[in-house]
Image (spheres, grey):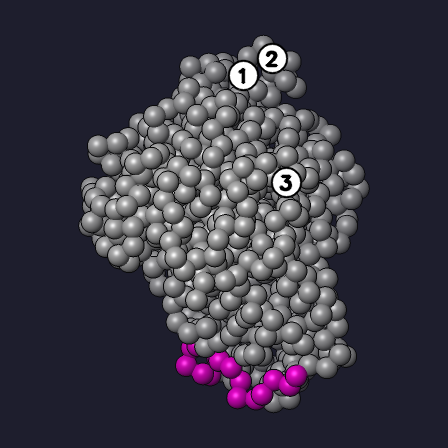
Amino acid sequence: MASAGAANNDGAGASSLAGASNVGSSGSAGAPSAGTGAGAAATAGNPGGGTENATAGSGGSLTNPSETYPLPDAATLKDEDGSSLWLRYPLVPIPGRLAEYQAAFTTVVSAADTPSINAAEAELVLGLSGLTGKTVQVAPAVTGAGAVVLGTATSAAIKDLPLVARLTPLGPEGYLIEHAEVGGQAVTVVAGNSDVGVLYGAFALLRHLQMHQPVGELALSGSPKIKNRLLNHWDNLDGSVERGYAGKSIWSWASLPGSASSAVLKNYARANASIGINGTVLTNVNANAQALTAASIAKVKAVADVLRPYGIKAYLTARFSAPREIGGLSTADPLDAGVKQWWAAKIDEIYAQVPDFGGFLIKANSEGQPGPQDYNRTHADGANLFADALKGRGIVLWRAFVYSDTSPPDRIKQAYEEFKPLDGKFNANVLVQVKNGPLDFQPREPFHPLFGAMPKTPLALELQITKEYLGEDTHLAYLGPLYEEVLKADTKLNGTGPTVAHIIDGSAQSYAVTAISGVANIGSDTNWTGSHMNQANWYVFGRMAWSQDISAELVANEWVRQTFSNDPMVLTPVVKLMMQSREALVSYMTPLGLAHIMGSDHHYGPGPWINDLSRAEWNPVYYHKADAQGIGFNRTAQGSNAVGQYSTAVGQALGARASVPDELLLFFHHVGWTEKLASSGRTVWEELVYRYSHGVDEVGSMREAWATVKGRVDAKRFKAVDDFLQTQHYEARWWRDACLAYFGDVSKQPLPAGYAPLAKTLAEYKALKSQCPTDVTKPRCTPVYSGSPSPAITP
Ligand code: GCW
């Protein structure tokens, strides 16, 4: 996946974090919290990460109407292409609820004529008309029952209502939705403390209705805790997307500014506003200086103008050497006066065109990117250069994803070693952006030890939505449980707490500025994300960026109701398979804390044997350390002592065999193949065989669950999801068989009884490198798509 400036070949590969079970996290990995989501509680929020409260006349939880959902007929189950995402607003199919909505929502009355309130009005007209099957009109005033009144706390129709007292504390982006009396009529008020707050309220009301919730005692409210909730697009100016599996870049950079008027950008803005995302970084962190030319700034302006009404700011990535590359300067030294002047002028030039420009995201001195260390300056010197020029206008997100090219003893320790000494040295408008784990977006890792280690420096969390290491476009892996695990990870700095969520929402260490980033999975594909199910990952990122306390299961419940159906016959099996998907993938790819054992460069398919890349820490063998005696990376005090970078409580728990969770065992310990695990009584080898095989069979049960919704989901999307599940099942078997072939060969351990034999030889798996994949943006491996992958655990 070549891209301008991308120095990464396999180096950028591996990383991992997660904090399953109670060490380093409070979430128990993978086990869905309660039931299958049908009745999942709808309250998300306590004083911590963002709030969202819903009472709708049924005691505060998502309800399933007592009415039975009819089996849809061909007329109502038209094929869909996924382009509407979760903003589909289909006619409510249950008569009671339909009648309730038709009575409650007849007109929309806006208290102001501003871009964001107009966007809210248009969305409500579209949504309410779709859901009620009636044309909902815009009216200048309340003239009868069923009006939805939009406005802020200062709007004439709203300012004297009692609800204003409850609205004010919700902050600048907060919203409140309640019944009230206006003009002597019972109405529904959608109020915000700002126009964008009203827009968020409109989307929250439509989400509530799309989930067929009662509106008798409507009282919804929400306010985000984290101020900047961003997507990071690794989009190149040539239209390619690094680690993108959903087609070309949606910006169509070459045809900007003209193409900014396309419906795509507007729908992109609607989708993001509906989940509370308020910032987007347009360009790849492997940055191109051409993104900062006058011509490019005009393109950014065009995009920013489309996004602004939806409360979304545009950001860019800055190539540190731009003063030399496009500025004609001989240096890019951050302390050089000419360089400071150049950036100050460049930033003024941007603000002249984009008055609400968000700021810069910067990857420096990482994977070959230029940076301040090229001038023997620190990361703080580099970041503060931009911070000074952006002061009072924008923020700097300075990435901590660094590892040197002199093959350190333990790559995962480097970011901590480089950044911790700089705590408190960054200007107030700088956040250090830290990946969820110390390695690189693996299916599971411990949380990054920098969280909690820089009390004087705001830290932003970087999550990956695109599935670079989790099956790219095809594999169904709902990332909600991973995100929840990270956010709820307990740093134990104070014995108990703070969690990573409380670090990044600023409550634990009183950060003045807060941010969370998600590396986008969006492209020009009709379904936006390469598969229908990948849409859920964009959705859950937004929902958890807004409210860090919301559960993955509740979000899956919301998404399935809006994207497919509220029918329990669909909801129950689909939420269940989504909630088991990430853990299944961990099992068939990197069980027991293994990490970074995938194919080189494209990171697709298994490659635990790889040992020929130029830098040691790019090779899978560097991470699993498998030898005749055992497997796993010794990061204890007797090894690289990476555990020493955590709080004492977490470090000791991870560093001891008795307390390290099985899910992280081989991430922190090198253990003998025949050592028995206390949890299962199996040897390490037998446990690997069990987990790899269990993972494959889990995909089998996900396929069976999806099959049950046939006829209740439109045929087109049903088939697309079903086909990808089949591909995933084959590839899960490939992962299992290839990894066990290799580890079996190294350990000389036989496959225990009760397991399906390996389909091919180790040599045959190694040889697949020349055939798979042919297209790294849509990776496939047809030579392994045969036979029946399950049962891998034979009865
Ligand atoms: O995850 C790795 C990827 C690179 C990426 C890098 C990073 C944008 O393999 O493609 O580069 O990390 O996060 O900077």
Q: Is residue 384 visible?
A: no
**Residue 370 at what x, y percent from top left?**
53, 21
Checking the image for residue 332, the label placed there is: 1
Which SS class for mark 3? loop
Foreground label between 3 and 2: 3
Residue located at (34% from left, 39% from top): 631
- Range drawn in magenta: 55-71
Is the residue under label 3 in contact with that under label 1 (CB below 8 Å)?
no
Q: Earlier in the sequence, mark 1 or mark 3?
A: 1
Compared across the picture, whether 694 is left or right of 93 comes to left
**Residue 409 at what x, y percent from top left?**
34, 25
Return the residue nearer the eye: 225 or 556: 556
Q: Is residue 659 visible?
A: yes
Residue occupied by mark 3:
772
Residue located at (71% from left, 48% from top): 524
How far apart are the alpha carbons under marks 2 and 1? 7 Å
The amino acid at mark 2 is Leu
**Residue 412 at what x, y percent from top left?**
37, 33
Residue occupied by mark 2:
329
Return the residue nearer the eye: 460 or 147: 460
The answer to which image quadrant residue 566 occupies is bottom right
Q: Residues within 10 Å of mark 3 (few under 14, many from 20)?
A: some
Q: Residues within 10 Å of mark 2 (few under 14, many from 20)?
A: some
Q: Main secondary structure of the magenta part?
A: loop
Q: Earlier in the sequence, mark 3 or mark 2?
A: 2
Above or below: residue 396 compared with residue 554:
above
Quarter of the figure that contains the N terminus: top right
Residue located at (61% from left, 57% from top): 787
Quarter of the figure that contains the C terminus: bottom left
